[in-house]
Amino acid sequence: MNTRSDLVRAAIWAAELVGDEIERASRGISEKTFAKGSYVCHRGDRLDYWTGVVTGLVKISAISRDGKAMTFAGVGPGGWFGEGSVLKDEPRKYDLVAIRDTRLAMLNKATFFWLYENSAAFNRFLVRQLNERLGQFIATTEYDRILDPKARVARNLSWFFNPVLYPDMRDHIEITQDELALLAGVSRQVVNRSLRALEEEGLLRVEHGRINVFGVERLANYGA
DNA sequence: TCATTAAATTGTT
DNA sequence: AACAATTTAATGA
């Protein structure tokens, strides 16, 4: 009972909820842990929970026809996802993989819908989140042909640190250059060279399987 | 816990 | 795309 209210209190969207709403949310939430490399959910599965990352990192990806993993997003601490599938009552369209040991907070569907119907604060959060995602999506199509490869790598990297979507994200992410290449739509070589260049410019530090970011803002606006 | 080996990731051509 | 170099993870004594 204590952990449940702790989970709610830690959730960013719960900050503005009023008494009754907090109580409901606490009863509908649970926690689950996933080991590094394990699947939270396979594409096509049903997962009737709205899911938040407490600690760790979850990769949202799909497998292309030639068997390569395509990463769409990494959800860091404080990030919530899956409202689309819950709202539409659809199977998941992507694989969800914990790429580190991860603790997830899961809000059941009934509670999600109750908040959706009854809480203005909850809806404000949903709109803000969807709007942020839309903005990011539009940005991809916009700069797809405008920016040079290095800038694309920089901006794609900055998304993992979006303060609205992932408020508790730290200053580093564990992702391979291979995955980042898939995400940015460039070759791995380009990612490698871009990262080294960005490192030279003091924006980040490359380690293996991991990237430390110093200037998220500068990355987000890189090439502008 | 340490040494050996396998696997994954990076760096270069 | 292929290769070599490097780092991590796994294994077993």
Image (cartoon, coloured by chain):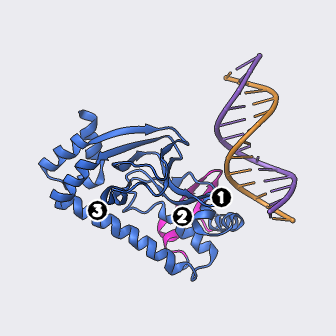
Chain colours: A blue, B orange, C purple
Q: Is residue A187 magenta?
A: no
**Residue marked by disc 1:** A178
Rendered location of residue B7, percent (x, y)? 71, 42
Give me the C-alpha separation between circle 2 and circle 1. Answer: 13 Å
Most extreme residue toward the bottom is A146
Q: Quadrant of residue A116?
A: bottom left
For label 2, the residue is A157
Residue A132 position in % (x across, y down): 37, 68
In the image, residue A205 sits, relative to residue A24, either above or below, namely below
Which badge, 1 or 3, is on the more N-terminal residue? 3
Task: Tell me: A76 left or right of A86.
Answer: right
As helix, strand or loop, the secondary structure at mark 2 comes to: helix
The amino acid on which the numbered mark 3 sits, given as a three-letter code, is Leu
Kindly report which numbered mark, 3 or 2, lies closer to the viewer in this rendering.
Answer: 3
Q: Is residue A213 magenta?
A: yes
Which of the 4 image quadrants contains residue A65? Answer: bottom right
Highlighted range, magenta: A201-222
Label 3 residue SS: helix
* CA distance separating discs 1 and 3: 32 Å
